[in-house]
Amino acid sequence: MNPASAPPDTFDREIVLSRVFDAPRDLVFQAWTDPDHIDRWWGPDGFTTTTREMDVRPGGVWRFVMHGPDGADYPNRIIYDEIVRPERLVYTHDSGQEDDPARFQVTVTFAEAGDKTHLTVRMAFASAAQRDRVVKEFRAIEGGQQTLERLAQYLAKG
């Protein structure tokens, strides 16, 4: 799905990333939902990730820390809303603080494309201003593209 096909009420407050991976859908889904895999590729260039807990089920939580190249630690929490194996994940992403104003909703789809996987990540923010802030301050689009590139490299290692 491309950004132009987003519903009109969310288009201006979304970031959409898409990529085709040279790997079967089941493997890409597993790489996204198994801490033994995800800690090896999650995050932009220069970051590492440490998973504290990962319970991939509706209502389950993934708590992790992203370690920046500057030595700073960034706590994160994902609360899973919907799991359709191996087709879709829907979750809320925040810092782990209750009522985090930077909280956003994510939908990840895993579509079969022959023996490859077409992955789309759709991040919906509370407002266009919040979206613009994460794009500018956190370079969210570039960081998301780097993260997907790291996933492609990880999958290529087999």
Image (cartoon, rainbow, N blue to C red):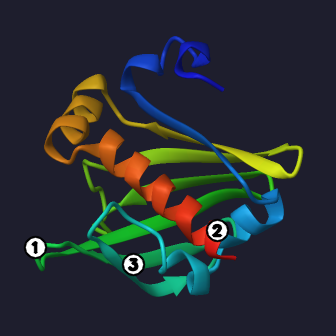
How much space separates mark 1 and mark 2, taking CA atoms?
27 Å
Give the labeled residue for mark 1.
70
Where does the image place residue 46, in percent across and percent down from the top left? Answer: 26, 69
Q: Give left or right: position of 135 versus 111.
A: left
Q: Give left or right: position of 60 versus 42.
A: right
Q: Secondary structure at mark 1?
A: loop
How much space separates mark 1 and mark 3, taking CA atoms?
18 Å
Direction right: furthest residue = 114
Direction front: furthest residue = 157
Q: Secondary structure at mark 3?
A: strand
Q: Residue placed at 23% from the left, 44% from the top?
A: 139
> Can residue 55 be seen in this snapshot?
yes
Give the labeled residue for mark 3.
64
Where does the image place residue 97, in percent across and percent down from the top left? Answer: 27, 67
How much space separates mark 2 and mark 3, taking CA atoms?
21 Å
> Can residue 59 be seen in this snapshot?
no
Q: Is residue 37 above or below residue 20?
A: below
Contact (CB < 8 A) between labels 2 and 3? no
Q: Residues within 10 Å of mark 2 (few under 14, many from 20)?
A: some
Give the labeled residue for mark 2.
155
Q: Give left or right: position of 23 versus 16.
A: right
Q: Residues within 10 Å of mark 1 (few under 14, many from 20)?
A: few
Disc 2 residue type? Leu
Residue 57 falls in image quadrant? bottom right
Q: Residue placed at 45% from the left, 68% from the top?
A: 42
Residue 141 falls in image quadrant? top left
Disc 3 residue type? Phe
Q: Nearer the viewer, residue 120 or 156?
A: 156
